Image (cartoon, rainbow, N blue to C red):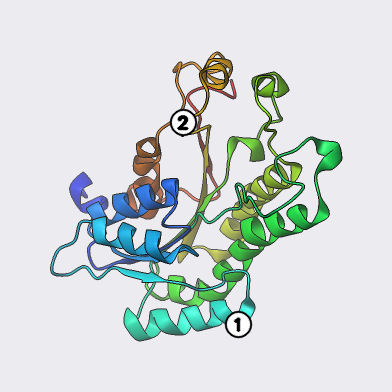
Amino acid sequence: MKLINDMMNLSGKTALVTGGAGHIGASIAHALAEANASIVVIDKNRDASSQTINELPRNDRQHHSSWQYDITSEQSVAELKEKLIETYGRLDILVNCAALVGDSTLTGWAVSFENQGLEAWNRAIEINITSCFLLSRTLLPLLRANKSGSIINIASIYGVYGQKPEMYESTDYMTPAAYAVSKGGMVQFTRYLASIVGPEVRANTISPGGVFRGHSTEFVEAYTKHTSMKRMATEDDFKGAALYFASELSAHATGQNLVIDGGWGL
């Protein structure tokens, strides 16, 4: 019988986390580092990436890296693969966490549906789902090599459920269609992957609910009245799920979507 501590131990394994300098990405990177994995953070924000790496726990067997690659470019992702081989010689865990959630230079994003723009739509699809395809396809040989690979896609409750417009009545914000569609695509892409990459690799999704990041009191009240837990999420709420899917704790789980929303979707 395997011991729980052994099953969750990621010692000797390498994990790649895209969007790893973001709120959820950094929390996941920290969780996997706590379990003794070596971490590669991919994020467009160089300074935030370096800070994330510096804050990760490490022992003498862990080697953490912060790299900048364009994960929507086929050539760039191919170069990333070669860098992984050169530096680590392996990849065990791929966390697709990078996402377009807002950009002050992008018009037609967090506006009414009638005003949402094609440029914003295309960019969200490119970052949120095309990158998952490119990374999963390109890095699959590395994930298969050690016969225990794990792909973890970070989607959203809006990839599973419809909008609740009444939550936004006190704000000037509305979740864009492209965000919801791309996150729903990640859930289905996970099922597709799970059906073809086994038995050497497992593929699963985590769908977070709303995470508190300084929202107005009116929005928090409107959101939490839909939840059983009566609060918005924190980044720490997703660390256990990430470790579960990354480790042998979920050795027979694939194609699953774990919704962590405090009961918002009930």
Q: Quadrant of residue 59?
A: bottom left
Identify residue type, mark 2.
Answer: Gly
Quarter of the figure with the C terminus: top right
Mark 1 sits on what residue?
75
User: Where is residue 104 shown, x and y percent of the image?
Assistant: 63, 50
At x 47%, y 24%, the residue is 262
**Of marks 1 and 2, the one in the foreground:** 2
**Dot 2: few (<14), some (14–19), or many (≥20) neighbours within 10 Å?**
few
Residue 59 in view of the camera: yes
Q: Is residue 181 left or right of residue 205?
A: right
Element under label 2? Answer: loop
Identify residue type, mark 1.
Answer: Gln
In-front residue for pair 262/102: 102
Element under label 1? Answer: helix
In-front residue for pair 30/192: 30
Residue 9 in view of the camera: no
Q: Earlier in the sequence, mark 1 or mark 2?
A: 1
Q: Is residue 15 left or right of residue 12?
A: right
At x 40%, y 40%, the residue is 238
User: Where is residue 34 shown, x and y percent of the image?
Assistant: 23, 52
Say if 45 sits above or below 174 in the image.
below
In-front residue for pair 37/44: 44
Q: Is residue 234 left or right of residue 258?
A: left
Q: Which label number is shown at residue 214?
A: 2
Q: Quadrant of residue 241?
A: top left
At x 65%, y 25%, the residue is 171
At x 65%, y 20%, the residue is 170
